[in-house]
Amino acid sequence: MKHTASRLVYTVIVLFVSSVAVFYAIRLSGGDATAAALPGSATEEFREEFRDRLGLNEPIYQQYFTYMGRILSGDPGNSLTNNKALTTMLSEHGRNSLILGGTAFGLVFLVGVPLGIVASLRRNSWADQGIMSMSTVAMAVPNFWLALLAVWLFASRLGWLPSAGCCGPKHLILPAVVLAFEGIALTVRMTRSSMIESQNSDYVRTLRAGGLSEWRITCKHVLRNALIPIISLAGLRIGQIVGYALIVETIFGWPGLGQVLVNAVLRRDYPVAQFFSLVLVALVVVGNWVADTGYTIANPRLRKSS
Amino acid sequence: MSFVESKIGPGESAPGPEKTPVLEIEDLRISIASAGSSFEVVKGVSLTVCENEIVCLVGESGCGKSMTALSVMGLLPRGVARVTEGKINYEGLDLLSLQSRELRRLRAESISMIFQDPITSLDPVFTIGSVLQEVVRSHRNVSRAEAKEIAVRALVQAELPDAADRLDSYPHQLSGGMRQRVMIALAIALDPRVLIADEPTTALDVTVQAQILENLRARQREREMGMLLITHDLAVVASVADRVAVMYAGEIVEEAPVEELFADPQHPYTQGLLRALPDISVSRAGLYSIPGRVPSPQTPPPGCLFAPRCEHVLDSCWEGNPELKREANRSLRCFNPQPFEVR
Ligand SMILES: Nc1ncnc2c1ncn2[C@@H]1O[C@H](COP(=O)(O)OP(=O)(O)OP(=O)(O)O)[C@@H](O)[C@H]1O
Ligand SMILES: [Mg+2]
């Protein structure tokens, strides 16, 4: 439990530091906010007044605290381009992103782990070699290219699936698979090597000496031990999915947080860009914390010792 | 300390002449295939362990002790080592010809093994109680409660402190010595006839070593198990063994009852081992060690395998490897045995 508590403190610190970093980065690189909000004909005076109203002329650290205060009180502001409340946007697009990201995350483990287990149990067989070479290819293929290929093949050529849109199960398949692809490949490889390592460890020899069946040893002891490092890296998979979501959502026209963020950056809608950057960063940090807690539960060595 | 005297009570040790063999290894050969080449690491080992008898197998690191022991359990590392020749008999059963299923049933139930490293030998994610009970229930058709009872009894016998409260402990919550006691409990829980212990105390503190050894010996005596104890510590041999087999480069070079081996070692390698003991060579400046190194199994020397390091080597020793000759209750593999001198 001590481990979990210290992780929580650590998570809060990371959240703070990354929010500062995101805030500064967007403020410093955002260009002139008035360019997006005001027509080109607006006078410099009017622009100045606009900046004043938004608090853009105050010292930047003060802006940060004012801004975080507003977020924490539940009012992060509105979009500059369509004046929609950011909280409304978050609930609409956040739901879509959770569906897509959650499906991809599930696929990473539900497909990756079993394939890795098969490869490890049939080591050097054609199945193993097939799975391993496919995963090598999958890791080498860039995400956007895979997305375009998938659209071309399954939407344009075969016409099985829609090329873009939201939000039925049919629309979900292509973006979710593309989003999960690299994660699946990495999980396959990790599962395989982790299973093999566990398979060769001393305690397996002890269990064999105890007369347990191979099947039992593999399904219970080897697997359970092999899953620990995989769970420990689940946080990385979350980060990867969030990062790739920007590309994949844009290509497939999936109206999630990533798409909103990309559009906001292109339009210099800095309140949106800033807020959704923070949301995504928070998602990754908190996701890592959850994964870490899972790791603690899976690994008795990290639990409170008696 | 003098070795022969340090034996625990003369009366309870040496078993009578009517010993029944429980484990017989005959002309066992084990090959290792690695990186394309294959070489023999066990070269025709024969060894008998009788009921209520402790046989110690000693020899330098790498001479094939563990391979011999693992082959009895059918636990040689897969794809690396395999038995190429020989027989292993357990109470009349030829272990090498058994189906893996049948062999599995004998493990823990009839033949058990304890390994060297208690730190890595226990599954870290399950409690010791659950593993013990799992082993019990995979052999016996008993209820959970009965399995638990058997588990606790085994832990008590292995002298794990607060045994009943330890069932829910994970291995990392126990010290090395306590983990080795758990290994002992796993090995004796089902009351096997043969216990193989591969350097069970090498990884432990000196103080704990003696207790663990004492415990093993006590369990062996009360259950009249046949025990094969692998060690390279001659002090251990002196305190617990009934018979000793000395192994060198994959062969047994000398075998004798423990008193006779210490009183009258005949093979120059055995003599070298005894001379290398600190308390025999105290009078001399520094410690004695046998000159030279163990020949690599890939490139064995011609003739006697010990010839390159032997102080009594004759020309004929280079021409052929001597046979293991049996004489009364001991055997010896040497062309030119000389009386032992402590120098
Ligand atoms: N997995 C392996 N791959 C290749 N060679 C091996 C392997 N395991 C053991 N060997 C070789 O087999 C020989 C016998 O090994 P074994 O483990 O039986 O020695 P040992 O007498 O038990 O030594 P120790 O006292 O160090 O435990 C050694 O020369 C070793 O190098
Ligand atoms: Mg060994």
Image: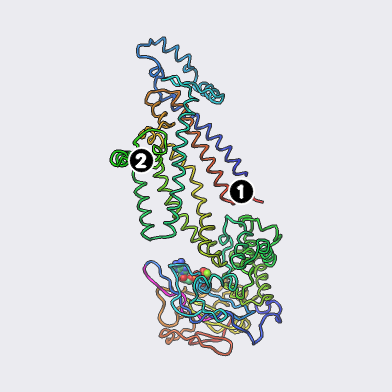
Say which chain tag 1 marks.
A
In the displayed structure, A250 sits above or below A268; it is below
- Which residue is rendered at x = 50% and y = 54% of the image? A226
Residue A6, percent across and down?
59, 40
**Does residue A145 appear in the picture of this structure?**
no
User: How far apart are the alpha carbons under marks 1 and 2?
Assistant: 38 Å
Q: Does the magenta stretch include residue A100?
A: no
* Residue that protrudes farthest toward the bottom in the picture: B328
In the displayed structure, B155 sits above or below B40; it is above
| For residue B50, side relative to residue A272 (left or right) | right
- Which residue is rendered at x = 47% and y = 56% of the image? A195
Label 1: state its secondary structure.
loop
The response on whether ligand 2 sits within 8 Å of label 1 is no
Tell me the crowding category of disc 2: few under 14, some 14 to 19, or many 20 or more residues within 10 angstroms, Cα based: some
To which residue does mark 2 refer? Answer: A143
- Which residue is rendered at x = 41% and y = 9% of the image? A45
To which residue does mark 1 refer? Answer: A303
